[in-house]
Image: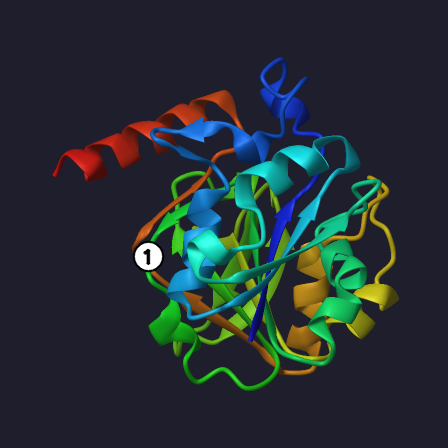
Amino acid sequence: MKGIILAGGRATRLRPLTWVVSKQLLPVYDKPMIFYPLNTLIQMGIKDILVIISPENSGLFLNLLGTGDDFGVHFSYAVQKEPRGLPDAFIVGEKFINGDNVAMVLGDNIMDHDFSTEIKDFNQGGLVFAKEVTDPQRYGVAEFDQNGQVLSLEEKPTTPKSNFAIIGLYVFDKNVSRYAKELQPSARGEIEIIDLQKKYLAEKQLHVKTFTGYWQDAGTFDSLLEAGNYMAKIASR
């Protein structure tokens, strides 16, 4: 399985912090933010990783991460000139994926959980992860039946059908780039990750697994601070 870290975008919610530096390079306690999603992929046993970055920050990422030797992995880089939505990563990275299975993690998602057990049996289709939250209206939401099978997916619903939010870690098979190319932009002008998941769901090929570990989308001032405080507590134990 190959890995992708999506570290592009403009991060308007974190301005003025992100006027001169990428969000994924901001500190979360004692590490750059991108180190956390990178560790998520490394724990999963992934060695071949594509880092997707914006052109204005490309040199900063190269200086920080290098070839990957320091992390025991191999990095490739691709520039996303304009943020077209999360599934665009599978279009930008199509040659890198090259027909393999791929796990993509968002560069601002901080997790303290080893997902290697959950993905060890992955062969085909799609696999995403959901965590129970108190504010599901902010996220993509999964609805389950009594047997734990996913019934529906909704993006930032006003009236959520459950409290389970889909986190920023997505595992897909070789069809992902083709499916991503078939997506139509939403009202906000981007192709949406929830629509990609729905394609797999329609084919009865989407699996949603719940977990109880730590997860934070560090894309706001409050969540960035909370993630840093959490990691500081972990380090002091």
Judging from the image, what secondary structure is the residue with disc 1 in?
loop
Q: Residues within 10 Å of mark 1 (few under 14, many from 20)?
A: some
Q: In the rendered view, would you say 120 is above or below 59? A: below
Placement of the N terminus among the 4 image quadrants:
bottom right
Q: In the rendered view, would you say 51 is above or below 123? A: above
Q: Nearer the viewer, residue 58 or 125?
A: 58
Where does the image place residue 154, in percent across and percent down from the top left? 62, 55
Check disc 1 and report the residue beneath it.
Answer: 113
Where does the image place residue 117, in percent across and percent down from the top left? 34, 74
Residue 164 visible, this angle? no
To which quarter of the image does residue 203 belong?
bottom right
- Left/right of residue 108 with respect to residue 119 in the rendered view: right
Where does the image place residue 164, in percent across and percent down from the top left? 44, 54
Q: Residue at x 58, y 30 (%)?
A: 23
- Left/right of residue 158 with respect to residue 32 in the rendered view: right
Q: Nearer the viewer, residue 13 or 25?
A: 25
Residue 13 visible, this angle? yes
Where does the image place residue 34, in percent across and percent down from the top left? 50, 42
Amino acid carrying label 1: it is: His
